[in-house]
Image (tube, rainbow, N blue to C red):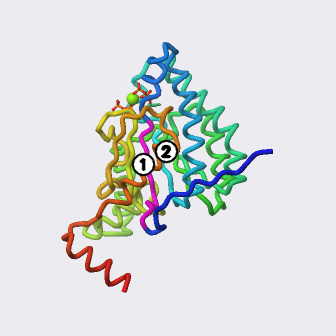
Amino acid sequence: MSVKTSYKLDIPAEKLPKHVAIIMDGNGRWAEHRSLPRFSGHRAGVETLRSIVQMSGELGIQSLTLFAFSSENWRRPKKEVGLLMELFMTALGREVTKLHETGVKLNVIGDLAAFPAKLQKRIKESMRLTKNNVGLQLNIAANYGGKWDIVQATKKVAELVKNGEIDSADITEELLNDHLSMSDQPEPDLFIRTGGEQRVSNFLIWQLAYSELYFTRALWPDFDRDEYAKAITSFAMRQRRFGRTGAQILESEQRENA
Ligand code: IPE
Ligand code: IPE
Ligand code: MG
């Protein structure tokens, strides 16, 4: 019998991030520290992924975006790239039924055309299966690059201009935004990068414009529920000002609470 656990944090719901985006980094080093092949780190990373997805659902987070493979990761040794593709394929096959049962809606973002046909097919089937689910929105960024995203959105907008549907003067931030990946979801409130590096590595660049950034030295396979809770607690304690002053924010909070 499986016991369903529920992670409770002492944080009011309105202080929780609606959308969390994570660079899952440090798998290779985790394995190297144990004198294991890098691939064991990626495999261990899938276990972490499963528990973070589950905890996000339990906390009532709306969207979770995970960076699984960047447009730059093709530069890795062929063997590692191949093993990563296989892992993606088997993990999707193994996890999707469970995700579906728990109401997760799966969305894979990135330039999927570069993936093996079999993998593309499995991705499409998984997205189709879960498309009407209303629980956690899980976005997996695969062959994704923030610059690619802006270019693909720009191409769509250029088509509209070319077809005479809009004038170039009609191009606004909102219009470009509408053509980016995940435009149907709130922008990430919280960005987490594990593994100790403090860089964005061409992950979401437009969408992170006002995200709160959280970096941890924990390697992805070691990023457990307590580490995730620490990141969310750090987020909940921050004052988001969006250009306003601290006093303005306090005033509007007091007005809301009155
Ligand atoms: C992140 O872990 C996973 C992928 C990029 C697929 P890394 O493989 O980058 O791990 P490190 O940074 O070498 O430790
Ligand atoms: C970013 O990690 C990509 C993913 C986690 C999928 P990398 O480990 O590839 O990033 P860099 O190259 O060290 O910046
Ligand atoms: Mg890395």
Q: Position of residue 205 (x, y in %)?
A: 32, 49
In the rendered view, tell whether residue 5 sits above or below residue 143: below
Q: Residue furthest bottom?
A: 258
Q: Position of residue 242 (x, y in %)?
A: 26, 66
**Residue that mark 2 sits on:** 226
Q: Residue at x 81, y 45 (%)?
A: 1
Residue 230: give its label: 1
**Is 92 left, or right, of 173 in this rendering?**
right
In the rendered view, tell whether residue 236 sits above or below residue 249: above
**Is 103 left, or right, of 252 in this rendering?**
right
**Is 135 left, or right, of 41 in this rendering?**
right
Name which residue type carries label 2.
Asp
- Around disc 2, counting alpha carbons within 10 Å, would you say few (fewer than 14), some (14 to 19), or many (20 or more)? few
- Around disc 1, counting alpha carbons within 10 Å, would you say few (fewer than 14), some (14 to 19), or many (20 or more)? some
Q: Residue at x 38, y 49 (%)?
A: 191
> Which element type, helix, strand or loop, lies under badge 2?
helix
Name which residue type carries label 1.
Lys
Q: Quadrant of ligand 2?
A: top left
Q: Which range of residues does the magenta coloring cover?
A: 15-24
Q: Is residue 179 magenta?
A: no
